[in-house]
Image (cartoon, rainbow, N blue to C red):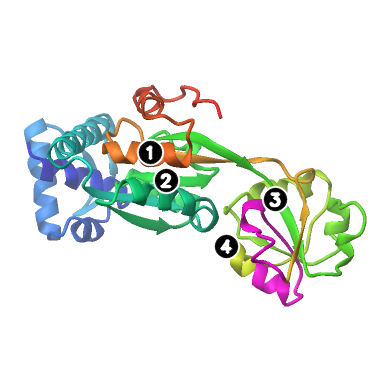
Amino acid sequence: MNFQQLRSVREAVRRGFNLTDVAEALHTSQPGISRQIRELEDELGVEIFVRSGKRLTGLTPAGERVLPWVERLLLDAENLHRAGEDFRHGEVGTLSIAATHSQARYALPDAVHDFCATHPNVQLQMHQGSAAQIARMLREGVADIGIATHTLEDQPELVALPCYRWTHVVIVPPGHPLLIGPISLQRLAEHPVITYDTGVTGRGSIDDAFARAGLKPQVVLSAMDADVIKTYVELGMGVGIIAAIAFDEERDTTLRAVDARQLFPVNTTTVAVRRGALLRSYAYDFIQIFAPHLLPDVVRQAQAAPVGTPSAPL
């Protein structure tokens, strides 16, 4: 048994049993992947995968039982490697962070600035994506830390800890009718709406609020990030609904914001890491800089806790 065999099994499951994709991910050949899997199956005395001809189509009952141990062995090997790096190199290395656009653009800059000032020998890599993409990057080890709203706490392989709460604002051009009098969902629904794509930055809570009120807004345009939404609101195409952190009065001088916290549920941004995975010491430092209540011991204890254990309070 060797790690290449274990990686071949893990990637086969991650890549939907497509051996061409597995070979590309592991920088080897498809016949080599098939051989690694067969050699492990021969050593264990069981078939891990269901086959149709030469194609893998799923996991056998034995494979379902074996897979968690494969994942655990590979995770332990990664942890051992990181522990060694911490002792050998200390504050030297790379930290990979995956975040949604709103978090990367508006919530993270101060934390990144402060971290770089105190950890000059750590290279930061920033990835952007949807919450679902961030969860995948964490599971596959592409990212060490993920920061997003929603979705991450629903992943059993991940530990998601609350960082901060935020609300929405409605943005309009100066002189817009919504700036006069109290705002309501009914008044909002009378105007074309520009907001986030489905599954991005609290869009679900926006849709739920309108649905509970028996309203269906006319969403004329949706986008991944607030900057795009603001651009089209400036053009007069509709009213925007964005995260409050994405609006800055000093920068966004051509727009006005109306507090909408009474219309839409409060959202919670979480920081997520892989369950059971050891991080470099500076990764725990970054988390604490971004969310001071998330001390390194708090994060480590959460990582070691069984699935279903309540998260640390905000």
Kind of residue indicated by mark 3: His
Residue where numbered disc 2 is placed: 146
Q: Is mark 2 on a helix, strand or loop?
A: strand
Residue 185 lies in the magenta stretch: no
Q: Could you tell me if residue 116 is visible in this image?
A: yes
Q: Is residue 235 above or below residue 306?
A: below
Q: Do residues under tags 1 and 2 come within 8 Å of each other at their CB atoms?
A: yes
Q: Which residues are drawn in magenta?
A: 230-253
Kind of residue indicated by mark 4: Asp
Residue where numbered disc 1 is placed: 273
Residue where numbered disc 4 is placed: 225
Residue 232 lies in the magenta stretch: yes
Residues 106 and 58: in front is: 106
Residue at 81 percent of width and 69 percent of height? 174
Q: Could you tell me if residue 47 is visible in this image?
A: no
Q: What element carries label 3?
A: strand
Give the CA distance from mark 4 to mark 2. Answer: 17 Å
Kind of residue indicated by mark 1: Val
Which image quadrant is residue 262 in? top right
